[in-house]
Amino acid sequence: MEKLKSEFNQGESRAVFPQSYEYEKKRGVLSKKLRQTVSEDERRILAKRISEIDKARLLIPYSDSFDDSFKRIQYVRYADDFLVGIIGSKEDAKAIKAQNKGICVKKSAFGAVRGEDLDYPF
């Protein structure tokens, strides 16, 4: 499974939406001005603008959850069960399911793993 993980994992992180990045930059500039400002009226105005940016940032996702250049696979085993979590396309998941089904059927000589247990729908 470690070999499959090293082959499948792709990309460092998901792509960030440009608008989200712009909000982050604007908020940073305003926060710096807020720290340097002495006037109470100006501080109130800056705080309100920062609050507006925070509200706008909540309406858009930070990163693209459907980024094709980012893929991950995670394998967890507990006793005689295992779980494979996949960040990727449905086709990737079906291909990995087919690979793992072949592995499990080969290793089921002792009857510990039944092929029908692997037929969960996607």
Image: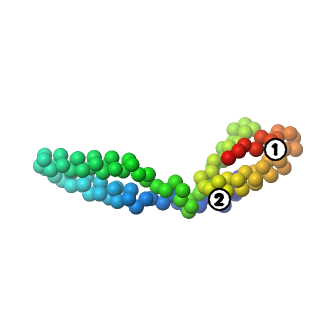
> Three-letter amino acid code at disc 2?
Phe
C-alpha separation, residue under disc 1 versus residue under disc 2: 24 Å
Give the camera-side residue of 87 and 89.
89
Task: Classify 10 Å Cα crowding around label 1: few (below 14), some (14-19), many (20 and above).
Answer: few
78 or 41: nearer the eye?
41
- Looking at marks 1 and 2 on the same chain, the residue that comes earlier in the sequence is marked by 2
Quarter of the image where one finds residue 26: bottom left
Res. 6 visible in picture: no
Q: Give me the residue at 76% from left, 54% from top.
A: 99
Q: Is residue 47 left or right of residue 116?
A: left
Disc 2 element: helix
Q: Is residue 10 visible?
A: yes
| Residue 70 image point, x, y percent | 56, 59
Instruction: Measuring from the top left, give residue 42's x and y in whole percent.
Output: 15, 50
Q: Residue shown at 62%/56% (left/top)?
A: 89
Relative side of 36 to 110, left or right: left
Position of residue 106 measured from the top left corner of the image (x, y, whole percent)? 84, 49
Q: Amino acid at mark 1?
A: Gly
